Image (cartoon, rainbow, N blue to C red):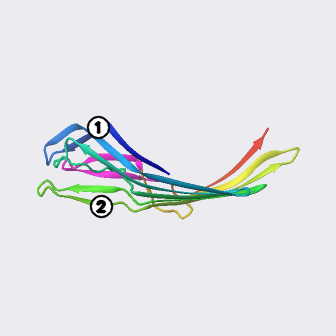
């Protein structure tokens, strides 16, 4: 188990809004805090993991009218990960599942001074793989199949988060789609 609290200074954000006569780069800071828990269990040649994160990330920029911290775009309160690896030599199986509670999206009303929050849907992904290792004297290698996002969930990733002017009166958030259903076959020969 690990608990943390981290302050970050020197953040910058570009804001452009003709409706509010704003076009500038603003400075800010953030604070992140939470708890991470991980458990691992080995059973003979097999391994299993579970981890859970409870966290909060808040930010404060000079353009915030109320001067108070609010949830950061990358704040995801809950994340659960499950994984397992089975060793039935020469066959090896693995699977992992990730669940995230979603990211906030803010709408601020200049007229009322109020803020509302909507949430992007949850993140959920299941990956599986099987590997066969062949190690006879003449030929050594591995063959396998892996499938990412087995359930083909329409997840979003925040790494490609951008703020883009929309008609110069507001900004919109664009989230790129994360990994779609992706099967992969492979063959590796040892020389």
* Residue at the (32%, 56%) spot, across then down: 104
**First-in-chain label (2 vs 1):** 1
Given residues 119 and 46, the one toward you in this image is 46
Q: Is residue 159 part of the magenta span, yes or no? A: yes
* Residue at the (57%, 62%) spot, across then down: 150
Given residues 151 and 117, the one toward you in this image is 117
**Direction bottom: furthest residue:** 151
Q: Within 10 Å of the Cα at label 2, are there few (<14), some (14-19), or many (20+) other Cα atoms?
A: few
Q: Which mark is residue 28?
A: none
Magenta stretch bounds: 158-178
Circle 1 residue: 12
Secondary structure that dominates the magenta span? strand
Q: Within 10 Å of the Cα at label 1, are there few (<14), some (14-19), or many (20+) other Cα atoms?
A: few
Residue 131 % position (x, y): 71, 54
Q: State how many labels appear.
A: 2
Residue 49 % position (x, y): 59, 57
**Direction left: furthest residue:** 111
Q: From the viewer's perspective, is residue 37 above or below residue 62?
A: below
Given residues 105 and 171, the one toward you in this image is 105
**Direction right: furthest residue:** 137
Q: Which mark is residue 118?
A: 2
Residue 4 % position (x, y): 41, 46
Label 2: state its secondary structure.
Answer: strand
Residue 5 % position (x, y): 38, 45
Label 1: state its secondary structure.
Answer: strand
Given residues 29 and 36, the one toward you in this image is 36
- Which image quadrant is residue 83 in? bottom right
* Residue at the (88%, 44%) spot, across then down: 137
């Amino acid at each position: 188990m690990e608990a943390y609290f981290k302050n970050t200074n020197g953040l910058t954000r570009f804001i452009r809004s003709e409706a509010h006569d704003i076009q500038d780069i603003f400075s800010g800071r953030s604070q992140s805090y939470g708890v991470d828990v991980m458990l691992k269990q080995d059973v003979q040649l097999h391994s299993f993991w579970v981890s859970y994160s409870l966290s909060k990330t808040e930010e404060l920029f000079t353009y915030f009218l109320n001067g108070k911290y609010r949830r950061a775009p990358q704040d995801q309160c809950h994340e659960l990960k499950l994984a397992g690896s089975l060793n039935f030599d020469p066959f090896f199986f693995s699977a992992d599942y990730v669940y995230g509670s979603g990211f906030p999206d803010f709408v601020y009303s200049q007229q009322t001074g109020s803020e509302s929050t909507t949430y992007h849907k949850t993140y959920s992904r299941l990956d599986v793989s099987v590997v066969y290792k062949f190690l006879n004297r003449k030929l050594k290698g591995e063959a396998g199949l892996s499938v990412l996002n087995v359930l083909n969930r329409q997840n979003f990733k925040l790494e490609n988060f951008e703020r883009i002017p929309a008609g110069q009166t507001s900004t919109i958030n664009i989230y790129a789609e994360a990994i779609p259903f992706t099967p992969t076959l492979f063959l590796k020969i040892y020389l």
